Image (cartoon, rainbow, N blue to C red):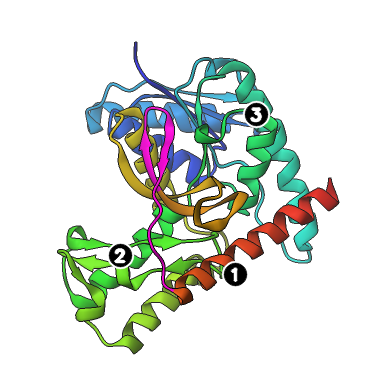
C-alpha cells in the first residue's frame, strides 16, 4: 500500500512541504486548508509539475474536510496564524491553541495511527495542544524545531569556513526561540569539532545568528517568514519515519525524566523510525549547557502555564 502524508495548512510552509514530499516520491499527499479552493489549486499546480519533475506521487487538495486524510501515515500540521501588529502574545497563543485543538482532533479521528509532526508556532507549546487533543501516545507527537535550527547553524558554519554543508553537523537543543541551546561542542565539520576550527568569538556570533535565524529572515522579507527550510526540516523528519531509518535528529519530544525534565515537549536528540520517537538520546551536558537547557525548558513551561490560564 502506498504511503500517505497529510499536510494541514496550505500556506507557504505547507505547500512547500507537499512539493518536497511529492518530488522525493515519499508518499501521496493530501493538502488541507480552510480557504476555499486554495489547497485544490496548489495541489493541481503541483500535479501539473509532476511530468516535468518526473514523479508519480498523487496530490489532492481539500477545504475543511479531513476524510481524505484517512489512514495517513504522517500528518504535518502547519496551520495557525502569525502574530499581527497590535496582537498580544496571549491573543496569538489563544487563537493558535484553538486551531491546533480542532486540527488534532480532526486528523486523529480519521488517521488514528499517524505520527504528528507539528510546525505551527509557538512550536513547543503547540505540541502540548496536539498531544492532549489527539490522545496519541507521546512517541507519535513530535515538533519540528531542532532540525530547522540545526540546519541554520550548519549553514552558517559552512559559510564561515567555506566548506560543504554536507560536511557539517550541528546540534541545537531546547525550545524553538530565543532560549534555544546550540551546542558547539557537539557541532563538527567532517568529524572535527568547530571549537578546533574557529575562534570562540566567531562561534558565539554564529550561535547568536542561529538563535535569531527566523527573525533575520522576517526582517528581510518584511512580510511573511521563512518557509523553504522549515518545510525541508519537516520532510526530513517524515522521511526518517516513513523509511524507518532510525535517524537521530533534534526534535521537540515529550520528556519523562530525561535531562531532569518532566511532562514537557522540548528539543532533544531523538531516534526517528516507524513508531515515531523511538528513543530519546541523553547526552552528557556541561553545567553551563544544562543550565541553558533548563532555562529554555522554563520558558516553554511558562507558555504551557499560560495556555492553562487561557484554557
Q: For this view, does 189 lie left or right of residue 2?
A: left
Say which residue appears at 30% left-offset and 64% top-offset. 154
Image quarter (top left, top right, bottom left or bottom right) of the C terminus = top right
Residue ID for mark 2: 154
Q: Nearer the viewer, residue 133 or 100?
A: 133
Q: Quadrant of residue 206?
A: bottom left
Instruction: State the separation of the CA atoms marked 2 and 3.
Output: 34 Å
Compared with 86, 9 (above or below) is: above
In the rendered image, residue 125, in percent from the top left (x then y), is placed at: 65, 50
Residue 279 part of the magenta segment:
yes
In the rendered image, residue 242, in percent from the top left (x then y), is placed at: 35, 28
Q: Which dot marks residue 295?
A: 1
Say which residue appears at 37% left-offset and 20% top-offset. 3
- Helix, strand or loop at label 2? It is helix
| Residue range (magenta) | 270-286
Q: Nearer the viewer, residue 59 or 267?
A: 267
Q: Is residue 112 visible?
A: yes
Amino acid at each position: 500500500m502506498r504511503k500517505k502524508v497529510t499536510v494541514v495548512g496550505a500556506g507557504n510552509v505547507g505547500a512547500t512541504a507537499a512539493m518536497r514530499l511529492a518530488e522525493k516520491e515519499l508518499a501521496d499527499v493530501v493538502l488541507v486548508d480552510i480557504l476555499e479552493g486554495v489547497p485544490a489549486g496548489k495541489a493541481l499546480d503541483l500535479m501539473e509539475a509532476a511530468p516535468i519533475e518526473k514523479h508519480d506521487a498523487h496530490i489532492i487538495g481539500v477545504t475543511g474536510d479531513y476524510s481524505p486524510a484517512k489512514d495517513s501515515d504522517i500528518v504535518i500540521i502547519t496551520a495557525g496564524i502569525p502574530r499581527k501588529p497590535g496582537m498580544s502574545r496571549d491573543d496569538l497563543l489563544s487563537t493558535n491553541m484553538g486551531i491546533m485543538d480542532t486540527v488534532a482532533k480532526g486528523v486523529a479521528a480519521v488517521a488514528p495511527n499517524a505520527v504528528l509532526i507539528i510546525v505551527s508556532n509557538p512550536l513547543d507549546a503547540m505540541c502540548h495542544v496536539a498531544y492532549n487533543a489527539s490522545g496519541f501516545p507521546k512517541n507519535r507527537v513530535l515538533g519540528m524545531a531542532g532540525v530547522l535550527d540545526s540546519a541554520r547553524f550548519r549553514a552558517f558554519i559552512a559559510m564561515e569556513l567555506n566548506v560543504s554543508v554536507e560536511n557539517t553537523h550541528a546540534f541545537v537543543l531546547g525550545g524553538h526561540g530565543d532560549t534555544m541551546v546550540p551546542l558547539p561542542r557537539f557541532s563538527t565539520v567532517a568529524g572535527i569539532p568547530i571549537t578546533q576550527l574557529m575562534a570562540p568569538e566567531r562561534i558565539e556570533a554564529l550561535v547568536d545568528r542561529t538563535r535569531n535565524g527566523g527573525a533575520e529572515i522576517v526582517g528581510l522579507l518584511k512580510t511573511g517568514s521563512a518557509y523553504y527550510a522549515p518545510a525541508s526540516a519537516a520532510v526530513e523528519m517524515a522521511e526518517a519515519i516513513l523509511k524507518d531509518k532510525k535517524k537521530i535528529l533534534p526534535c521537540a519530544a515529550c520528556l519523562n525524566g530525561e535531562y531532569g525534565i518532566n511532562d514537557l515537549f522540548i528539543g532533544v536528540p531523538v531516534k526517528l523510525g516507524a513508531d515515531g520517537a523511538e528513543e530519546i538520546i541523553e547526552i552528557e551536558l556541561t553545567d553551563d549547557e544544562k543550565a541553558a537547557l533548563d532555562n529554555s525548558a522554563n520558558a516553554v513551561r511558562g507558555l504551557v502555564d499560560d495556555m492553562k490560564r487561557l484554557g
